[in-house]
C-alpha cells in the first residue's frame, strides 16, 4: 500500500488540540505516516495494529474519530465497525474507512456497516485532513444540537413545574379565599340566628308565662258559669239564645284541648329558640367538649325549610339511629359547617328523586379502626394524625342518602378542591374539600365516601377522642 503525501507543511490548528484520533492499520509505515501527519495538525493520535487492540483501546478511552483500514488479518475493518456500532458506548464515534478497495460494492458495504466516510488509497493528505475535519465538525454540531435539545427539554420541564406550582398556588389561594368567605358566612349566620332567636324569645316567653294565667282565668269563669246554671231558677231567654249561639257546652269541653295545644306549640317554639341559641354560640377558635347529636340536630333545624313537604312531592324524611355517644373535644362551629355541607349535598342529591326520599344518620363508638379500614378502599388518601396512640377511641357518624349515587371516577375526585358535579353557579366544588380538611387536619380524623350508581351515597366521618 502506498500513500501520496503533499510535502507542504500544515499549519498547527488550535481547534484540533485535545481531539483524539485512533488510527487502525496493520501496516506500521502507514501508521507512522498518518500519525505524523495528524500530529502536525494538532491532533492527539493513538495507534492500533489490529482489530482486537483497536476494540480494547476504544473501551479504555473513547477517541473522537477512528481511521480504519479494511483489509487486516483475523478481524477486518467491517467486523470492527460492526462491533463498534453495536455498542451503545461507542456507536456515536465517527468511523472513516481508508482502503485500497475502490469498488462501489465495497464502499456501499462500508456505509452499511455504519461508516461515516470512505477514503480510497492512495490519497492526498489534504483530503484526509479535510474529511476528518468535516466529520469532527458534524460530530461537534450534533453534540451541540443534543445539548441544546436537552437544555430546551430541561427548560420546558422547569417552565411546566413553575406553571404547576403557580396553578397549585392559585388553587390554594382560591381555596383559602373560599374558606374565609365560608367562615364569614358561618359567623354572619350565627349572628343572624342569635338575633332571630333573641327577638323570638321575648314574645314567646311572654306568651308562655301568660298561658298559665289564661288557663286559671278560664277555669274560674267556667266554675262561675256552672254555679250560675245550678242556682238560676228561671232561665232568661236572651241568655239561653247566647248559650246556643256560642255553643257553650262545646266550648267548655274543647277549651282544655285548646289550651294544651297552645302550650305544646309554645314549648316547641322554645325548643327551636334554644337550639338556635346553641347553634349561634359555637366558637370556631376554641376546642371544647361537644355533643355530636346536638350539633347534628341543630344543623338539621336550620335546614328544616329544605326538608319539609312541598306542593308537588313529599318532603325528605330524616331517620336517626343514634347510639349513646360521649362528649368529644372539638371545634363545634367547624363541625357544624361539615354537617351543613353534607346535609346540603344529600338534599341536593334527593331533590329530583322519587319518593321515598330518605337521609339516614347513624352514630357509633369504636375502639379501633378495623370497622372503617376494612370497608371499601379510601377514594382519597387520609391522614390519621393520632393513629399511633393506642388508647384513642373513635366516634363514627354515617350520613346516608338514597339518591342516584356516583361512579368510581367521581368518588376519586369528590374531595378535590373545585371539583363539582353541580351546574355552573350552584356549587363551588369546595364544600367537601373544606369538610375533609376540617375532619382530617383540624380534628385528626378520617372522612370517606362510599357510593355506587343507583345505590345512594354514604359519607363516613371518624372523630378520635380519649376515653376517660
Image (spheres, rainbow, N blue to C red):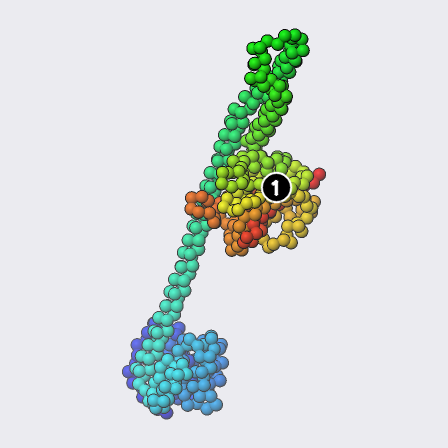
Residue at screen point 65% across, 40% down: 322
Place of residue 327 in the rendered image (x, y in percent of width and height, measured from the top left): 65, 37
The answer to whether any part of residue 263 appears in the image is no
Q: Is residue 244 above or below residue 446?
A: above
Residue 109 appears left or right of 334: left
Place of residue 73 in the rendered image (x, y in percent of width and height, measured from the top left): 46, 91
Place of residue 131 in the rendered image (x, y in percent of width and height, measured from the top left): 33, 80
User: Farthest residue toward the right?
Assistant: 468
| Disc 1 residue crowd, few under 14, some 14–19, many 20+, Cα 10 Å | few
Place of residue 40 in the rendered image (x, y in percent of width and height, measured from the top left): 35, 79
Residue at label 1? 319
Residue 380 appears left or right of 78: right
Q: Is residue 201 above or below residue 134?
A: above
Choose between 381 and 44: the one closer to the eye: 381
Residue at screen point 32% across, 74% down: 13
Report the number of discs. 1
The answer to whether any part of residue 315 appears in the image is yes
Choose between 435 and 192: the one closer to the eye: 192
Say which quadrant the N terminus sits in: bottom left
Residue at screen point 45% across, 83% down: 82
Residue 354 appears left or right of 96: right
Choose between 434 and 347: the one closer to the eye: 347
Say which quadrant the C terminus sits in: top right
Amino acid at each position: 500500500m502506498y500513500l501520496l503525501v503533499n510535502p507542504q507543511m500544515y499549519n498547527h490548528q488550535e481547534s484540533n488540540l485535545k481531539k483524539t484520533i485512533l488510527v487502525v492499520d496493520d501496516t506500521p509505515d502507514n501508521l507512522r505516516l498518518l500519525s505524523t501527519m495528524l500530529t502536525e495538525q494538532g491532533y492527539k493520535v493513538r495507534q492500533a495494529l489490529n482489530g482486537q487492540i483497536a476494540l480494547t483501546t476504544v473501551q479504555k478511552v473513547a477517541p473522537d474519530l477512528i481511521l480504519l483500514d479494511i483489509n487486516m488479518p483475523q478481524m477486518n475493518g467491517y467486523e470492527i465497525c460492526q462491533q463498534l456500532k453495536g455498542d451503545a458506548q461507542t456507536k456515536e464515534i465517527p468511523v472513516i474507512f481508508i482502503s485500497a478497495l475502490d469498488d462501489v460494492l465495497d464502499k456501499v458495504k462500508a456505509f452499511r456497516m455504519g461508516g461515516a466516510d470512505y477514503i480510497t488509497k492512495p490519497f492526498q493528505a489534504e483530503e484526509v485532513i479535510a474529511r476528518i475535519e468535516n466529520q469532527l465538525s458534524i460530530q461537534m454540531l450534533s453534540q451541540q444540537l443534543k445539548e441544546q435539545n436537552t437544555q430546551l427539554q430541561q427548560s420546558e420541564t422547569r417552565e411546566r413545574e413553575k406553571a404547576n406550582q403557580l396553578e397549585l398556588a392559585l388553587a390554594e389561594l382560591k381555596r383559602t379565599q373560599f374558606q374565609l368567605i365560608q367562615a364569614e358566612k358561618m359567623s354572619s349566620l350565627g349572628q343572624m340566628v342569635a338575633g332571630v332567636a333573641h327577638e323570638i324569645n321575648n314574645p314567646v316567653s311572654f306568651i308562655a308565662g301568660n298561658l298559665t294565667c289564661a288557663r286559671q282565668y278560664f277555669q274560674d269563669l267556667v266554675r262561675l258559669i256552672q254555679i250560675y246554671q245550678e242556682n238560676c231558677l228561671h232561665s232568661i231567654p236572651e241568655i239561653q239564645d247566647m248559650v246556643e249561639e256560642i255553643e257553650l257546652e262545646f266550648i267548655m269541653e274543647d277549651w282544655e284541648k285548646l289550651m294544651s295545644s297552645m302550650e305544646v306549640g309554645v314549648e316547641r317554639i322554645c325548643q327551636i329558640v334554644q337550639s338556635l341559641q346553641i347553634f349561634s354560640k359555637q366558637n370556631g377558635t376554641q376546642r371544647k367538649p361537644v355533643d355530636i347529636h346536638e350539633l347534628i340536630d341543630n344543623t338539621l333545624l336550620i335546614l328544616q325549610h329544605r326538608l319539609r313537604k312541598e306542593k308537588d312531592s313529599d318532603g325528605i324524611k330524616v331517620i336517626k339511629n343514634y347510639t349513646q355517644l360521649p362528649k368529644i373535644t372539638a371545634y363545634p362551629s367547624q363541625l357544624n359547617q361539615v354537617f351543613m355541607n353534607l346535609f346540603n349535598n344529600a338534599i341536593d342529591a334527593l331533590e329530583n328523586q322519587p319518593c321515598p326520599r330518605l337521609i339516614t344518620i347513624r352514630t357509633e363508638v369504636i375502639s379501633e379502626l378495623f370497622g372503617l379500614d376494612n370497608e371499601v378502599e379510601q377514594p382519597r388518601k387520609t391522614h390519621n394524625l393520632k393513629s399511633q396512640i393506642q388508647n384513642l377511641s373513635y366516634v363514627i357518624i354515617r350520613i346516608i342518602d338514597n339518591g342516584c349515587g356516583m361512579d368510581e371516577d367521581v368518588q376519586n375526585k369528590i374531595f378535590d378542591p373545585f371539583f363539582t358535579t353541580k351546574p355552573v353557579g350552584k356549587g363551588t366544588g369546595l364544600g367537601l374539600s373544606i369538610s375533609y380538611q376540617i375532619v382530617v387536619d383540624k380534628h385528626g380524623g378520617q372522612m370517606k365516601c362510599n357510593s355506587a350508581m343507583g345505590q345512594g351515597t354514604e359519607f363516613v366521618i371518624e372523630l378520635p377522642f380519649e376515653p376517660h
